[in-house]
Each structure stands twice: as structure tokens, then as C-alpha cells.
């Protein structure tokens, strides 16, 4: 884990120097990103959704609401039988040979350490005034990279908890480093004053 963080820090230092930046205001929060990244918004049903399109045309999507998900908790280990292998997307099948994964005859009768093949790793950090979970794929470019905050406001008891997830999928090293750097600039405006 520390090696990955050191590598990401070095990538940030070397790949991000000299990049012009701008702040995008999404109303509920602001984020500072490379100047050539573009904002987009969509109409959500039960939450505020939108995101950013990077210069390499990657979509970085956020979900701001009661049902925002922590992708690291929904991830199965990268151990597949013939059925689960067939359920992978075309992109996942293309990227799979370059990952640490295992193919078995029977998922339920295999004596395998599932923790060794987890798809994601994460660390906790303080972003603005909140405890945030920064999530990255263990295999470069295979899966989502992003952030999850369990509660900006409200509580489970009142069923009004507001959560936040912001993810990009299958990102190359440069975009992933820029995205993580941008996530650390998040400013939640009114939510921090309520949180204190």
C-alpha cells in the first residue's frame, strides 16, 4: 500500500507540473482540475449526478445523494469460474490478461485466499472537513478510481444521510494521478459549516 502511495505521489509530482488548472463549481461543491477538462451535468432521479470529461475523453462521474455507492464494498475478488468469466464486459476481458486474477473450476469449492485477489485498495484521508475513502484498483487501469464520503449531512437514523461518490473507470496512470490530485481539492461549501 505504501509503495502504491509513493508511486502515485511521484507520478503527481512529475506528470502534473506545469499543468494549468481551473475550478469547476457544481453548486453543491467545487473541484480544481486541469484546464482542458470539461464539466457536464445530467438529470438524476434520486440524487444529483454529473461529472467531468478529461482531455483523453474519460468520464469521471459523481453521485451526490442518499444512494451514492462505495465501489470498494461492492467488489468481488478477481477469481472467476466459467460463468463469472463470461459475465465480464468486453473491456474487462481485454484488460484481464494484464491483471492479477485467478480462474478456477468451481468458485465455491476452491481453497483460495480471496483477499489476495481483491480488486481494490483504499486509504482514508481528510478532504475539506470530511473523512474520505480514496479508492484505486490494485491492477493498474482495471476498475474504478475515486472517492467515497459516507456522510456529508444527515444520519441513517433519520434516513436523510447525504453521501458522495466520484469515480472514473479504466484510467491510465496520468489521468488517475490528475484525478486523485483534483479530488483532494474538493470543497463542499455549506456542508463543512454544518459539519463542524
Image: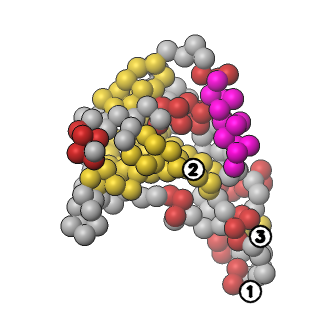
* Residue where numbered disc 1 is placed: 109
**Residues packed near mark 1 inside 10 Å, few (<14), some (14 to 19) or many (20 plus):** few
Which residue is painted at 71% across and 74% down in the image? 81
Vertical position of residue 53 compared to residue 99: above or below: above
* Residue where numbered disc 3 is placed: 103
Marking on residue 162: none
Dot 2 or dot 1: first in sequence order is: 1
Q: CA distance from mark 2 to mark 3?
A: 28 Å
Which residues are the magenta region? Answer: 1-13
Vertical position of residue 156 compared to residue 112: above or below: above
* Residue where numbered disc 2 is placed: 123
Asked whether disc 2 touches disc 1, contact meaning CB atoms under 8 Å apart, the reply is no
Which residue is painted at 31% across and 50% down in the image? 152
Q: Position of residue 115 (x, y in %)?
A: 69, 67
Residue 151: quadrant of the picture: bottom left
Q: Position of residue 35 (x, y in %)?
A: 45, 19
Vertical position of residue 70 compared to residue 76: above or below: above
Left or right? Give the position of 34 relative to 46.
right
Which residue is painted at 65% across and 45% down in the image? 141
Dot 3 or dot 1: first in sequence order is: 3
Amino acid at each position: 500500500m505504501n509503495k502504491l502511495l509513493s508511486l502515485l505521489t511521484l507520478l503527481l509530482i512529475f506528470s502534473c507540473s506545469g499543468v494549468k488548472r481551473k475550478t469547476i463549481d457544481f453548486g453543491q461543491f467545487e473541484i480544481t482540475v486541469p484546464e482542458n477538462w470539461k464539466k457536464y451535468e445530467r438529470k438524476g432521479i434520486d440524487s444529483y449526478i454529473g461529472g467531468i470529461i478529461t482531455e483523453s475523453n474519460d468520464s469521471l462521474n459523481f453521485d451526490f445523494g442518499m444512494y451514492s455507492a462505495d465501489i470498494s464494498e461492492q467488489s468481488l475478488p478477481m477469481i472467476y469460474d466459467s460463468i463469472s468469466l463470461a459475465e465480464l464486459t468486453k473491456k474487462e476481458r481485454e484488460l484481464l490478461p494484464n491483471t492479477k486474477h485467478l480462474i478456477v473450476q468451481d468458485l465455491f469449492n476452491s481453497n483460495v485466499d480471496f483477499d489476495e485477489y481483491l480488486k481494490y485498495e483504499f486509504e482514508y484521508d481528510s478532504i475539506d472537513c470530511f473523512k474520505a475513502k480514496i479508492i484505486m484498483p490494485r491492477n493498474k487501469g482495471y476498475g474504478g478510481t475515486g472517492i467515497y464520503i459516507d456522510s456529508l449531512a444527515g444520519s441513517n437514523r433519520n434516513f436523510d444521510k447525504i453521501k458522495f461518490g466520484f469515480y472514473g473507470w479504466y484510467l491510465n496512470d496520468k489521468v488517475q494521478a490528475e484525478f486523485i490530485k483534483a479530488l483532494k481539492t474538493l470543497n463542499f461549501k455549506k456542508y463543512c459549516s454544518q459539519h463542524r
